[in-house]
Image: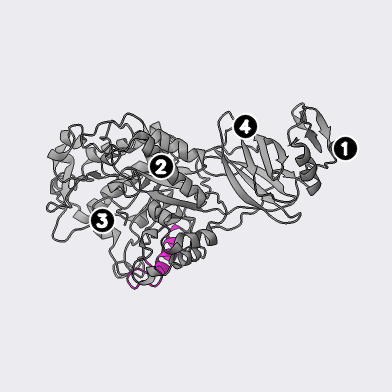
């Protein structure tokens, strides 16, 4: 628990494509000129075999060859386009300042700089998503009318404002780097204390003490929870999360494994009052599961009604049920989310209440109680035939522990194992462990599995219009640098673009970059690889990573 690929993609036809011969590269480099492609038109119809002269004149290919000796072709060669389709992300944890901010009460400038460093780490590792802890304990990293400001941000226990909006900054900075931003919420955690008297005066439980359950009731680990069995509390928690969905350009709403709390020996989660009032005689455990099911289903419905492109995903404990408890369970012998924390994770997938599921498979290959090599195929079978994508929660935090985790190849082996099944990506726990690269394990799996960029698997079932193809592709060659520019497509604005390149006349064009759509600015990308005789093509991608021609 948190505490905290499809491979090559088949080519599609009619892509915007630019081919540069070695002659083009050398001739253009000598003058530093722009050569435009796919742009000139008469009456809205493109002129075949034509390019745009730097002065704006339409010049046909043969004429272009006589200007500086560069021959330009604008037809679409038959290269196959290849892009890994897998989500790659990391959890950025705020509770107890585990990852970020490094301590409470930092200045806004320090908080922003640290956050940018984490995003830059993600980019260096060819990640394409971040999962940021914005509601760790009934608090908020945005100006929320439903929760006090987080102590882990402000360093203040009175819930006072830091005077700026971190969420707005976080989303914008992630998108500027081409990363998806998934806002990570702990829904029912209300506070890191077990006493109402310790809460800020503005805390909702001050006005609704009947919504509160303290668990465990004794010891330093006592925490306050919203009671999932109280309808008013459930809707309030939903509203508090949807406030962020309404106000910010989120790519996803993300929960981890905390619903009802994990059991503590000798302690009972005292929801007797709500059970007596609302259960109508149902079995206590079944009633709790239904409370969580209702919450998950309503969150999915309400998010999609508000913004159908915002993904909803959950990262549960890795075991639903053991086979000893249910024939449908996994061949494991560990704690069961179904009965221990009342999370019927298998049903959420079967009902399609989530867009993606991220079981936390924090065990090594060959573990006798919970074998990674048993659980991956079990989860792959659960998502088969559904629209739910399967990502795996990877235990970067365990590298270096005694036993199997002393082997720096463990995570490398796990990512390789995922490729044998319908696994759509991985999320790594947590950011600081990705940064620390204990035993060189991160470097090892990055080189083997994340050496090139990847596109997030598309979610095409949402009613989002796919973008048209980009237009006006042009190139400027200046020494070892080649800069591409193009114009946004007509119609629906894309969220980002994909750039492909090949150096071989008959080889596949591979993904080399994703470029964020920059609003009114002309999109561009600079290739500093010094590639010889490259062929480029650019496609547009919508919010859900559906690709244009």
- Please name which of the two marks, 2 or 4, marks the residue nearer to the observer: 2
- Image-quadrant location for residue 14: top right
Q: In the image, is 271 to the left or to the right of 56?
A: left
The residue stretch that appears in magenta: 363-383
Q: Which mark is residue 115?
A: 2
Marks 1/2: CA distance? 51 Å
Q: Which residue is mark 3?
A: 341
Q: Are marks 4 and 3 in contact (CB under 8 Å)?
A: no
Q: Nearer the viewer, residue 348 or 62?
A: 62
Name the residue: 68% across, 35% down. Answer: 471
Answer with mark 3 or mark 2, whichever residue precedes in sequence: 2
Determine whether the residue tagged by mark 1 lies in a helix, strand or loop: helix
Marks 1/4: CA distance? 29 Å
Q: Which residue is mark 1?
A: 66
Answer with mark 2 or mark 4, whichever residue precedes in sequence: 2
Name the residue: 46% across, 38% down. Answer: 173
Answer with mark 1 or mark 2, whichever residue precedes in sequence: 1
- Please name which of the two marks, 1 or 4, marks the residue nearer to the observer: 1
- Image-quadrant location for residue 525: top right
């Amino acid at each position: 628990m948190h505490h905290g690929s499809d491979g090559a993609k088949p080519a599609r036809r009619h892509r915007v494509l630019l081919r540069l011969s070695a002659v083009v590269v050398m001739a253009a480099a000598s003058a530093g000129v722009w050569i435009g492609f796919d742009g000139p038109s008469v009456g809205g119809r493109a002129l075949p075999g034509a390019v745009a002269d730097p002065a704006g004149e339409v010049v046909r290919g043969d004429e272009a060859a006589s200007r500086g000796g560069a021959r330009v072709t604008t037809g679409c060669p038959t290269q196959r386009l290849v892009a890994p389709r897998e989500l790659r992300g990391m959890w950025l944890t705020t509770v107890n300042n585990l990852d970020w901010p490094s301590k409470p009460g930092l200045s806004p400038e320090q908080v922003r700089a640290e956050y940018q460093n984490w995003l830059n780490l993600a980019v260096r590792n060819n990640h394409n998503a971040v999962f940021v802890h914005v509601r760790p304990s009934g608090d908020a990293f945005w100006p929320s009318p439903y929760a006090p400001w987080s102590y882990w941000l402000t360093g203040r226990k009175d819930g006072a404002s830091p005077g700026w909006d971190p969420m707005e900054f976080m989303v914008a900075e992630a998108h500027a780097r081409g990363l998806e931003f998934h806002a990570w919420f702990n829904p029912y955690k209300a506070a890191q204390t077990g006493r109402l008297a310790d809460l800020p005066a503005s805390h909702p439980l001050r006005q609704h003490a009947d919504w509160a359950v303290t668990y465990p009731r004794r010891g330093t680990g006592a925490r306050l929870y919203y009671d999932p069995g109280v309808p008013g509390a459930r809707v309030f928690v939903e509203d508090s999360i949807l406030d962020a969905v309404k106000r910010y350009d989120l790519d996803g709403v993300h929960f981890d494994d905390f619903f009802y709390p994990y059991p503590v020996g000798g302690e009972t989660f005292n929801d007797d009052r709500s059970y007596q009032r609302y259960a109508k005689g149902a079995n206590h455990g079944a009633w709790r599961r239904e409370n969580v099911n209702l919450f998950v289903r309503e969150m999915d419905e309400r998010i999609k009604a508000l913004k159908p492109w915002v993904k909803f995903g959950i990262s549960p404990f890795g075991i639903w049920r053991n086979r000893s408890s249910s024939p449908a369970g996994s061949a494991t012998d560990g704690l069961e989310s179904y009965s221990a924390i009342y999370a019927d994770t298998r049903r959420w997938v079967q009902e399609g209440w989530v867009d993606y599921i991220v079981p936390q498979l924090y065990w090594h290959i060959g573990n006798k109680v919970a074998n990674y090599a048993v659980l991956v195929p079990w989860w792959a079978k659960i998502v088969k035939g559904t629209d739910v994508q399967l990502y795996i929660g990877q235990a970067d935090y365990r590298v270096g522990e005694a036993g199997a985790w002393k082997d720096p190849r463990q995570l490398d082996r796990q990512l390789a194992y995922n490729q044998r099944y319908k696994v759509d990506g991985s999320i790594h726990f947590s950011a600081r462990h990705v940064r620390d690269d204990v035993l060189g394990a991160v470097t090892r799996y990055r080189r083997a599995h994340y050496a090139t960029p990847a596109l997030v698997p598309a979610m095409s079932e949402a009613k989002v219009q796919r973008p048209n193809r980009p237009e006006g592709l042009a190139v400027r060659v200046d020494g070892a640098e080649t800069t591409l520019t193009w114009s946004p497509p007509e119609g629906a604005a894309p969220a980002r673009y994909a750039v492909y390149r090949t150096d071989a006349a008959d080889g596949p064009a591979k993904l080399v970059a994703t470029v964020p759509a920059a609003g009114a600015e002309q999109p561009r990308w600079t290739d500093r690889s010094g590639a010889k005789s490259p062929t480029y093509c650019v496609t547009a991608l919508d919010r859900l990573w559906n690709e244009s021609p």
